[in-house]
Image: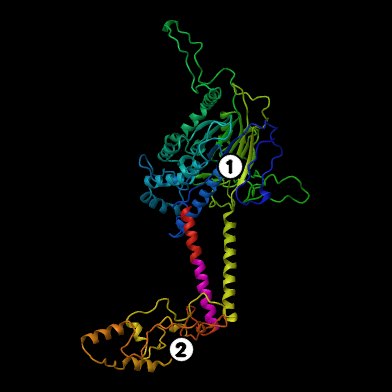
């Protein structure tokens, strides 16, 4: 049974499923691999992302992209339950731009910030500072830390524990090369941890390197003191990385043996001049301790010759077509390759010198993973870089220019003995990778748009059928009121006989109450003197006012304003019977015409669907 392969989330086309030429050898059925997930470039949208975008669109973009990542990450945790999650940098989009409380923040004198961004930078310094960055930090936690707890704290069978590591910085977090601000890097390390670190996970050693700071040593200003402060800590880490790896492996092996992770001294009392130092514990572990397979993590991809193809799984820039009759893929494929270039605060690949030095100093590197490019890229490097296989992981965000976001799943299986040496049944290939794709949100929006067009077409079709087949309309008729008039207006619209004057003020009159008088008659009835009430007196006058107020006159022939109509006034043999209309309808057409009926029906039905769907969508977005 081969290492478990992890399926994709969402509805991705089957042809994108990565295939490997060979799986690792069989393993015991009772052994479970360590499951690890790489997430690259979430790049939370912020004011730096679209500085010229107007107010309503920018918050809407933030809401939609955040909800997309939150839901995707939540499903990742629920369905896959990874033992470890690594972030490969660019956690924020404008993290390097938000002012810090302590330290120097201004751009260095050699900054190459584009002119179009300089005016925005002044606004950002005034408007966004440490407090805003802390809100972004909390926002990152809301999207990625809270759903982490959904899967629980228990690791998979046979695993040591669950980890989430997000300390690897990207150029959008710190800047790049000689333009990295030390105060920004200090803040990032304070909240996310050491940017250079060694972790032993699943009997593999993971070495995370802050390559955006390391790249300052290959800049034109590497000799300046300010620039040396940027790359010196990384170089010191790489200088001692062999010892750091050895200590980390020793701690892991001690744990697997059931003992304390730290080296222990013998408990005995000796005279200082006769003390035996031969059995002193070694922090690096026992003699003969093996070096576990090493995996390099870098935000910026390693150097490769220009035009090196990234393979068929690169979505946005697929491989060039082979010439007719050729069977081999195009070797120098600038379209499919990562461009070997750079600019303000970015560089697409590391320099060749830094790449070669990294592989050599770390040692025993069997695989490398990187981010930054936003699309998938798989390259096997040359012998100078140890023939290392490197995968550049897709962006997890839907707003990074690649239609189908994704992440990388690793299955690791490497059984070892007490000295870290692989057992006889261990496979020669201890790592298996699988690309997992998330739903294509643009395709989802396209389906929504198509469904909206079909819905509108059906509503318009029904509106045309209303006057033809005498269907029950959705819209109120022209001049109709949804409220019954009260008090004086009730009396004013009626003549002495209690019949409607046809003014259209009454909700019942608008539905076709037969009119017994024209406008002139109604007017005469309005100004005619009221009949005298026999007996006169204060009480009779008060009763008359009360009766007039509620729609009853003193004349016994005068009835109430509200009339109960028979169903025959509305229906004719079970079919709705339209009443004569006056004035203009909501559509602005003659209300008595078929076009007026159709116009009102289209407007009313479409508007009702729009506001109901809009409220539902707003509620779903609010819930995340």
Determine which of the numbered discs, if any, sits on residue 514 in the image: 2
Question: Which circle's residue, 1 or 2, is located before the other in the chain?
Answer: 1
Q: Is residue 271 visible?
A: yes
Select label 1 or label 2 by which is in front: 2
Where is mark 1, residue-wise? 80
The quarter of the picture where residue 253 lies is top right
Dot 2 lies on which element?
Answer: loop
The residue nearer to you, when weighing 435 against 472, is 472
Q: Is residue 598 magenta?
A: yes
Measured Cα–Cα span from mark 1 to mark 2:
71 Å
**Residue 323 included in the magenta stretch of the image:** no
Q: Outermost residue toward the left?
A: 538
Q: Is residue 439 above or below residue 606?
A: above
Q: Quadrant of the N terminus?
A: top right
Horizontal side, residue 156 vs residue 110: left or right: right
Label 2 packing within 10 angstroms: few (<14), some (14-19), many (20+): few
């Amino acid at each position: 049974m081969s290492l478990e392969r992890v399926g994709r989330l969402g509805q991705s086309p089957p042809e994108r499923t990565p295939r490997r030429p060979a799986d690792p050898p069989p393993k015991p059925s009772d052994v479970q691999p360590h499951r690890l997930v790489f997430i690259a470039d979430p790049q939370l949208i912020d004011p730096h992302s679209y500085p010229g975008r107007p107010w309503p669109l920018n918050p809407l973009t933030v809401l939609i992209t955040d909800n997309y990542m939150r839901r995707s990450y939540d499903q990742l945790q629920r369905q896959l339950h990874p033992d470890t999650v690594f972030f490969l940098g660019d956690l924020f989009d404008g993290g390097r731009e938000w002012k810090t409380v302590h330290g120097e923040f201004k751009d260095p004198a050699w900054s190459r910030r584009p002119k179009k961004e300089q005016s925005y930078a002044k606004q950002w310094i005034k408007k966004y500072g440490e407090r805003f960055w802390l809100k972004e930090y909390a926002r990152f936690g809301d999207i990625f830390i809270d759903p982490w707890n959904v899967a629980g704290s228990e690791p998979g069978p046979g695993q040591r524990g669950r980890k989430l590591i997000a300390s690897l910085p990207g150029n959008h977090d710190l800047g790049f090369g000689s333009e990295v601000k030390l105060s920004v890097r200090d803040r990032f390390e304070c909240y996310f941890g050491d940017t250079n670190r060694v972790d032993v996970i699943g009997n593999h050693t993971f070495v995370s390197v802050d390559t955006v700071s390391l790249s300052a040593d290959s800049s034109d200003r590497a000799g300046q003191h300010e620039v040396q402060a940027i790359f010196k800590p990384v170089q010191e880490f790489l200088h001692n990385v062999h010892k750091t790896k050895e200590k980390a492996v020793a701690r892991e092996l001690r744990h697997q043996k059931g003992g304390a992770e730290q080296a222990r001294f013998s408990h005995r009392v000796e005279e200082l001049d006769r003390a035996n130092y031969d059995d002193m514990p070694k922090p690096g572990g026992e003699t003969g301790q093996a070096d576990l397979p090493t995996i390099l993590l870098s935000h910026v991809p390693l150097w490769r010759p220009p035009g090196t193809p990234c393979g068929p799984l690169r979505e946005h820039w697929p491989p060039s077509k082979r010439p007719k009759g050729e069977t081999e893929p195009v070797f120098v494929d600038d379209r499919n390759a990562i461009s070997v270039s750079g600019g303000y605060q970015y560089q697409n690949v590391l320099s060749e010198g830094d790449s070669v030095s990294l592989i050599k100093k770390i040692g025993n590197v069997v695989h490398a993973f990187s981010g930054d490019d936003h699309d998938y890229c798989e390259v096997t490097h040359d012998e100078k870089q140890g023939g290392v296989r490197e995968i550049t992981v897709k962006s997890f965000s839907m707003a990074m220019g690649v239609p189908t976001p994704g992440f990388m799943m690793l299955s690791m299986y490497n059984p070892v003995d007490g000295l870290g040496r692989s057992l006889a049944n261990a496979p020669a290939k201890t790592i298996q990778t699988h690309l997992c794709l998330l739903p294509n949100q643009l395709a989802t929006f396209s389906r929504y748009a198509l469904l909206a067009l079909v819905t509108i077409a059906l509503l318009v079709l029904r509106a045309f059928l209303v006057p033809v087949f005498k269907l029950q309309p959705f819209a109120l008729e022209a001049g109709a009121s949804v409220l019954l008039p009260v008090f004086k207006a009730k009396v004013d619209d009626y003549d002495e006989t209690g019949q409607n004057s046809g003014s259209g003020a009454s909700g019942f009159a608008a539905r076709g109450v037969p009119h017994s008088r024209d406008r002139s008659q109604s007017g005469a009835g309005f100004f005619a003197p009221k009949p005298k009430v026999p007996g006169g007196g204060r009480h009779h006058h008060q009763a008359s006012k009360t009766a007039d107020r509620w729609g009853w006159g003193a004349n016994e022939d005068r009835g109430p304003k509200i009339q109960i109509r028979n169903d025959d006034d509305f229906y004719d043999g079970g079919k709705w019977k339209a009443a004569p209309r006056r004035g203009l309808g909501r559509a602005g057409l003659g209300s008595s015409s078929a076009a007026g009926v159709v116009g009102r029906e289209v407007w009313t039905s479409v508007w009702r669907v729009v506001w109901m769907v809009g409220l539902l969508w707003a509620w779903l977005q609010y819930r995340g």
